[in-house]
Amino acid sequence: MRGSHFAILVVLFSLLAGCANISAPTGGKKDITPPKLVRLTPADSLLNTRVKKLELYFDEYITLAEPSKEITISPILQFAPIAVATNKHVVVTIADTLLEDNTTYRVSFGSAVRDLHESNPFTKYTYTFSTGGYFDSLSLEGNVLNATTGVPDTSGVLVVLYKASENDTAIVRKKPMYAIKPDKTGKFRFTGLPGRDFRLYAIRDDNNNMMYDGGVEMVAFNDDIVRAGDTAMKAPVLRLFPEVADSATEIADTAASGKKGMRTKQRMSRDTGFFYSLNVDSSDISKRTFDVTDSFRFVFNSPVVLHEGRLHLSRDSAGVWVPVPMKVKQDAIRTMRVNAVAELAANTVFELVADSAFVTDTAGKAIIGARYRFRTMDRDDYGKIKLEIPGRYSTKGQKDGYDHILMMTAGADTVYQEKITDSVVAFKRLKPATYTFRIIADKDGNGKWSTGDLFGRKQPEIVFPGPQPLVLKAGWDHTIEFEQKPKATGKADGGKGNNSNKNR
């Protein structure tokens, strides 16, 4: 008996050990199927209905991802729908007291509904109902541009519609009825609109509150009331503008403040804290660093008093320092800045000497003298551009009663901004850079681009964008047409044009 008992125990032990080593079944293919809607109440596409609660039932357990962002209703209600998910069930609550009569509403779910385990989204679904006896089906389309450049720039932009009975203040205090994002080309198209009159705007909505908050945000408005489905109406063009300071002027002021080139700081003593910066690189006179078209710009950290005759410039001529005439002037408005202008020869070593106390601060403290030696850029370090402009923009050919301004920029710097007087503008000494051109319709005659005013119902001045940005290399010579893509006339030769195309 004992042997049989032992045998039984061995068998039981073996069975238990086998059970303990049972492995989990291997998984199959990953689930990539989104949840399926199996039931809906109330039914979709109902007329003469004011939906208060919408319930959706799915074939699997689901969850909601960013429902406040993804689940939207159009026309927009001042209080957004509230969505809650439980197991396979989603309930959307709508403030039906905010619903208007004879209006079609569409509830879009975006990608909010996802299956619980793999997060496969239930997408492209919109629930529709109407509080009237028909569904709105009209459309409205147009374009959005950045007024400062004249080209599409639609990142973060919303095109919005308000009731025609509202005034412009509505855009700063309440959400719109309809909102849509334009595509990358600036085109927008509203669909499912009623045959009503609207006010049309665009905003760069930095804080995503669907309203215009001023400051760094941009705004655009259409002069006229618009009506969806009006085939006689010209497609509106909305030009976004900042109501803050003129951006073109800010760019020019930034360039004038001394951001270009190297800066050298000089202090009088540690306890005064009185110093300045200068756009001169004096670290190595063998390197051609200073632009012969530039001026010397001293920028101080406090207002100064300029003392005449204490700033000197000379050039190296075979070891002899030859004085160079120079005009020195303090900025009348920004008294922390002093500019000095001189005729500079190419590829030449210059010495700029600031005598002791060439300026003092308002308390009479002076900065110790300083000496700067540097070399100017050579002719081959520059490029040339000849820009051909249609005659209608020049003072000789324009018939609009106002001048046009040619603006040329290199990055954030405004290189040129002058009234167009002829059909050809030639730039002989340009540093290698990427240049952009635009023309400003100077209606107010102030010589620069002027922004708009929303509440003053003033549109920004129109900007005509030029050709694609032109990459200018040292020694290259380009002739381009303002309304066509640029074509280089220089030939590649070690990064420069051939000898006939180099600056002389």
Image (tube, rainbow, N blue to C red):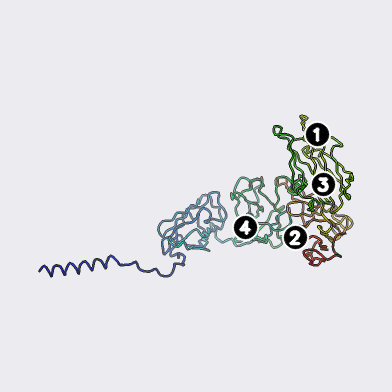
Q: 322 or 448, which is in the foreground?
A: 322
Which of pointers 4 and 3 lies earlier in the amino acid sequence?
A: 4
Which is nearer the N-term, disc 4 or disc 1? 4
238 or 365: nearer the viewer: 365
Side of 452 where 7 appears, left or right:
left
Q: Tell me residue 111's x, y (percent).
A: 51, 60
Give the residue pinned by disc 4.
181
Categorize mark 1 by other alpha carbons within 10 Å: few (<14), some (14-19), many (20+). some
- Which residue is under mark 2? 469
- Checking the image for residue 295, the label placed there is 3
Marks 2 and 4, how far apart at CA: 27 Å
The residues tagged by marks 4 and 3 sit, at their Cα atoms, a distance apart of 45 Å
Residue at 62 percent across and 57 percent down: it is 181
Q: Earlier in the sequence, mark 3 or mark 1?
A: 3
Q: Nearer the viewer, mark 4 or mark 3?
A: 3
Residue 493, horizontal then vertical, whole percent: 79, 66
* Residues at discs 3 and 1 in contact (Cβ within 8 Å): no
Q: Amino acid at mark 2?
A: Pro
Residue holding disc 1: 305
Name which residue type carries label 1: Val
325 to the left or right of 253: right
Camera-nearest label, 1 or 2: 1
Identify the residue at the far front of this view: 319
For label 2, count other residues whose C-alpha is less than 10 Å away and answer few (under 14), some (14-19) or many (20+).
some
Q: Badge 3, how many Cα within 10 Å: few under 14, some, many 20+?
A: many
Q: Can you tell which of label 2 and label 4 is closer to the viewer?
A: 2
Is there CB contact under 8 Å for labels 3 and 2? Answer: no
x, y (%) of residue 349?
83, 49
Residue visible at 73% across and 35% down in the picture: 274
